[in-house]
Every structure is written in C-alpha cells, then in structure tokens.
Amino acid sequence: MTLQRADIRRGMRLSVPIALGYFAVSFAFGISAVQSGVPPFLAAFISLTNLSSSGQFAGVKILAAGGAYVELVLSVLIINLRYILMSLSLSQKMIALPRWQKLLLGYGVTDEIYAAAIQQEGDLSFSFFASLIVLPVLGWSGGTLTGALMGQLLPQTVTAALGIALYCMFIAIVVPPATKDSRILKTVLIAAGFSIALTYLPQFSFLPVGWRVILCTLAASSLMALRDVRTLKERRQ
C-alpha cells in the first residue's frame, strides 16, 4: 500500500505542469470548436474521448467543412498513428500488468504523458500511470469546456485573437526539432509544399479538407521514408 501511495504521489506531481499546459491549449481549441459550429458540451466530450490536439483540430475542421465520415476517420487515424508506437514502447515497461489494465491506461497515452512515463526507471505500475493521466485529462476537457463557454461571451475580436493559439502551439512544437534535425525540416517543408499546392491550385479544388490532410501526410512521410531507404542502401554498398 505504501508503494502504491508513493506511485500515486509521484504520478500526480509529474502531471501538474502537463495539466496546466493542456488547459491553456484546449481553451483555444474550445473557442475554435464553437466558432466551427460545435456545441460547447460536445466540444468537451470530443476532448474527453480523444486527447489529441492535432487530431481534434483536424476533425473539427473536417466536420465544419461538411466532410464525409471516411475523411474524418482516416485523417484522425493517420494523425494519431504515433500513439500506437508510443503504446508499444510503454507496454515494454508494463509487462507485469494484466491486459485489461494496459487497455485502460492506453486511453491516456499522449506525447507529454509518454515523455514523462518513458523516462521513469524500471517498470511502471498501474497506480503511477493512472495518476499521471487524471489531471491532464481534467485539464484538457475542462479547458475545452471553459474556452467553448467563454468563447460565446467574449467579444469577437478577442476570440479571433485567441483562436490563433492552436497555430502558435503547432509552430512551437515543430520549429525547435526542425532546427536541430534536417530530416524533420525537410519533412515539414514537403508537407507544407503539398498543402499549399492542394489548397490553391485549381486542379485540386475538388478535394475536401480531410483528403488534403491525408494526402499531405502520406506524401511527406513516404518521400522521406524512400530517401532514408536509399541512403541506407548507399551506406551498405
């Protein structure tokens, strides 16, 4: 029991800064969702069941544009594929846990929670990882609901200004690693180039938003994967 209490305290302590950051970002998502026509409580429910800023933003954008469910599912699936890899990595530190506990904990795997958990020495207990999830989930869904409700009360100029916070978050996530790794920078530039082409070239005007996201993601990742394969072959020769 003492060990479980210590794990809970450790998980809660690590989760506080994650929860605060999630509240700020999801506040902006709540405003963006309401501006796209999503009711406040539905926006909060989306955050409660997804825990994915980029996936949620893309999904709401597709819904607002009247996209098909196939676009929505494929777009969110491709954007969130990284969570499968993260879950596989974390499962190696949860070998002793029953399968049902692993499935429950899989709900809370996000970039920040993964980063906090994978750095821990030794195996991860159910108590630790569950306590690491609770506050970020509350911060993410609570921030969304707060932003969605406040977005209906704040002046249009204020909500429009807060709406760009999501774009700022994406820039803050992408720019630092792109400046350190040329491969990431090239991937970003390829994806941006395809996105601009699919958005502004009249030949692709028929493509819905969701399919543009899918094509940009597949094109950038495929081209860089082929480049890495060629580089590896050249080194072996």
Image: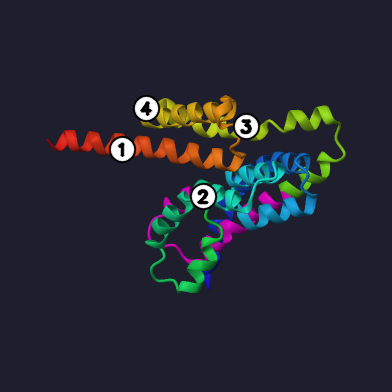
Label whose residue precedes the other's in the sequence (2 or 4): 2
Residue 188, position as x, y percentages in the image: 46, 30
Residue 218, position as x, y percentages in the image: 44, 41
Distance of mark 3 from mark 1, alpha carbons? 29 Å
Label whose residue precedes the other's in the sequence (1 or 2): 2
Q: In the image, is residue 230 above or below residue 56?
A: above
Label whose residue precedes the other's in the sequence (3 or 1): 3
Numbered disc 2: secondary structure: loop
Distance of mark 2 from mark 3, alpha carbons? 18 Å
Label pair 1/2, CB-CB below 8 angstroms: no
Label annotation for residue 45: none
Q: Which residue is mark 2?
A: 80
Q: Which residue is mark 1?
A: 226
In this view, the residue farthest toward the left is 237
Label annotation for residue 182: 4
In the image, is residue 137 part of the stretch drawn in magenta?
A: yes
Quarter-of-image position of residue 223: top left
How busy is the neighbourhood of tag 4: few (under 14 within 10 Å), some, or many (20 plus)? few
Distance of mark 2 from mark 4, alpha carbons? 23 Å
**Residue interval drawn in magenta:** 113-142
Q: Name the residue at 40% across, 58% down.
A: 88
Distance of mark 4 from mark 3, alpha carbons? 22 Å
Number of dots carrying numbers:
4
Q: Name the residue at 61% across, 39% down.
A: 209
Magenta stretch mostly in which secondary structure? helix
Q: Which residue is mark 3?
A: 167
How busy is the neighbourhood of tag 2: few (under 14 within 10 Å), some, or many (20 plus)? some
